[in-house]
Image (cartoon, grey):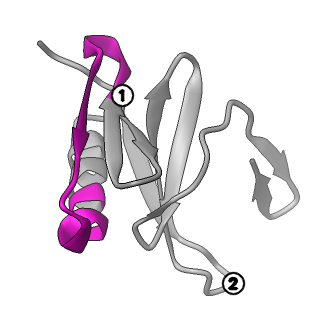
Amino acid sequence: PPFKSLEFHPGDVVMFPEIRHSAKLPHDLAVELKGTLQALAEMAGYGTNFAEARGKGCVRMTIAGHGRLQYTVDGQERPVFSRLIFQDDFLHF
């Protein structure tokens, strides 16, 4: 079935909330596979990426389901969140 959201969890687990499915990524390929999944989400219109202007890496944001977003920095997952705040030249989440 189709889905548009994914969530990364500790232990290299990726969950697909809409279809109630999860998968464990091979540890040695997890960073690369997370990036690939996020690139697919971007191509489908469900994500974006940008280089953090202070040199803190490549930030990729994708839909995590249930009104939330998730991001990675250089392939390392960060917690899901539900709020973006634009302030001056900064984006807080």
**Left of 42 or right of it: where is 87?**
right
| Element assignment for label 2 | loop
Q: Which of marks 1 and 2 precedes in the sequence?
A: 1
- In the rendering, at what x and y percent does residue 46 appear? 36, 34
Q: Which residues, given as a range, are shown in magenta?
A: 16-34
> Magenta segment: does it hold 32?
yes
**Left of 91 or right of it: where is 40?**
left
Q: Residue at x 47, y 31 (%)?
A: 64
Q: Nearer the viewer, residue 60 or 12?
A: 12
Residue 52, relative to residue 54: is it above or below? above
- In the rendering, at what x and y percent does residue 63 appear? 45, 33
Residue under numbered circle 2: 54
Q: Residue at x 31, y 50 (%)?
A: 38
What is the number of the mark on residue 79?
Answer: none
- In the rendering, at what x and y percent does residue 65 appear? 47, 22
Q: Residue at x 79, y 61 (%)?
A: 90
Q: Residue furthest right?
A: 88
The image quadrant that residue 14 belongs to is top left
The image quadrant that residue 8 belongs to is top left
- In the rendering, at what x and y percent does residue 10 appear? 47, 52
Is the residue marked by circle 2 packed among few (<14), some (14-19), or many (20+) residues within 10 Å?
Answer: few
Q: Kindly identify the amino acid type of the residue bearing the numbered disc 2.
A: Arg
Residue 58, relative to residue 69: is it above or below? below
Residue under numbered circle 1: 5
Is there CB contact under 8 Å for labels 2 and 1?
Answer: no
Q: Kindly identify the amino acid type of the residue bearing the numbered disc 1.
A: Ser
Residue 41, relative to residue 35: is it above or below? above
| Element assignment for label 1 | loop
Is the residue marked by circle 1 packed among few (<14), some (14-19), or many (20+) residues within 10 Å?
Answer: many
Q: Residue at x 34, y 32 (%)?
A: 15
